[in-house]
Image: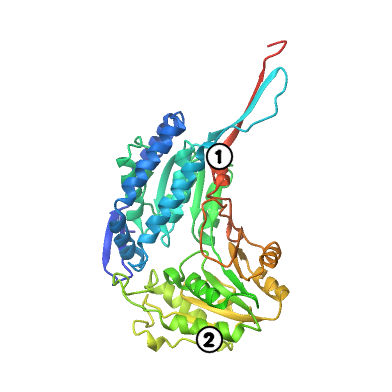
Amino acid sequence: MSDRLKVLSPIDNSEYVSRDYASASEIDAALSRASKAQQVWKRTPLEARIAVCSRMLDAFVARREQLATELCWQMGRPIRHAPGEIDGVEERARYMMSIAAEALAPVRLPEKAGFIRSIRREPVGVVAVIAPWNYPYLTAVNAIVPAILAGNSVVLKHSAQTPLCAERFAEAFEAAGLPEGVLQYLHLRHRDTEGMIRDTRVDHVCFTGSVAGGAMVERAAAGRFIGVGLELGGKDPAYIRADADLEHAVETCMDGAFFNAGQSCCAIERIYVHQSVYDEFVARAVALVKGYRLGRPDDPDTTLGPLVRASAADFVRGLVRDAVAAGAVAHIDPAAFPLDAPGSPYLAPQLLTGVDHRMRLMTEESFGPVVGIQKVASDDEAIRLMNDSEFGLTAALFTRDMAAGMAIGERLETGTVFVNRCDYLDPALAWTGVKQSGRGCSLSALGFEALTRPKSFHLKTGPGA
């Protein structure tokens, strides 16, 4: 096995960057530094922690264009869209900083004569953050900044496809004056990642990735009784009610399905449309998707870039092929997108009708630029189909009737319900999933809870004290 990590860019399959994998001694040293540094960092006043994170963001955002270009080359995000991820990092981090004092404050208890009682929030210790390639900065910041604000140290392991992202976080924190050892990164093989999770110096794991990866994390952490936060797969649905604003619904759903070439855990992967507006919705959606431009992501005119690797694109091609063989209708001619070819990461967008849940396209996570559209006759039918999934990350509804939207949302098995929008994380809301979309929570005030532990103080001040 090679001792070098090599990133092949989906743009042209060239080697974009290579790094040495961390050795056993380097991993051991990093965990020791993290444990030692955390003991000092947790005693640092919260105001000072917030100030460091603020300076980190200033340094990070100052490199916006460089970071966007590196994203483009590492994982294929169109350069016209890549800077938006840097903006999202700042939005989420600054929000978590703004609520940290209240979220981390001791729990207030009713007064009791003769006693002083309080519940304080202690940092858990060393937090291992394992981040994916599809939104490498956004997914990581959800855990990194709250963990550091709460007084933890962080060991960051990014995907082998986006190693520069870990390095850029570390550089920004170093520029901000974060004490040595509080934030470190390691480039790790899979076996070494498992070993790090098993290490007794790691006190919590934040993982974003596949269901199989989440299962690995749970196995590695088993018996250690540490916290594990898992954001895993999705097969997120949208429902277009008869009273929806169709122009808005089409634009929003197509963006939710095809942005980032569909490589998002909360991408819209299946759409249910009321039969009274079905034909018009499909016609509008097909016309919009035909206008996408598939091309090299470093071209500013490109609106749809390649998938992260050719094997991912071929997997999606297989889903489409199987669905068509089972009776589905594909509405987009791949020939209109010349870069699309078997064995290439460049894949034409595809929209299919005549689909149902006997097809893998409507049940397996595709993680690519494809969406199936199914006709329904009622809210009840839509709810049944939306819940007919092993996943439950987000679900989107499009309606002018907010009361109906809320009523439907209450019946959906999902972590987030959207009405008239999709594919967005509001940092004030808990980001969580159900079923095989994972467990745990990030963002919002609730996001601090997994990164701290309660510690009770019970002081007797009356007779006998």
Q: Residues within 10 Å of mark 2 (few under 14, many from 20)?
A: few
**Residue 163 image position (x, y, % from top left):** 34, 55
Label annotation for residue 283: 2
Q: Residue furthest top?
A: 464
Say whether marks 2 and 1 touch (CB < 8 Å).
Answer: no
| 35 lies left or right of 386 | left
Q: Earlier in the sequence, mark 2 or mark 1?
A: 1
Residue 370 appears in view: yes
**Residue 79 image position (x, y, % from top left):** 32, 67
As helix, strand or loop, the secondary structure at mark 1 comes to: helix
The amino acid type, in three-letter code, at marker 2 is Ala
| 179 lies left or right of 323 | left
* Quarter in which the N terminus is drawn: bottom left
Residue in front for this viewpoint, 332 or 205 = 332
Q: Which residue is mark 1?
A: 103
Relative height, residue 175 to residue 233 (above, below):
above
As helix, strand or loop, the secondary structure at mark 2 comes to: helix
The amino acid type, in three-letter code, at marker 1 is Ala
**Residue 450 image position (x, y, % from top left):** 56, 43
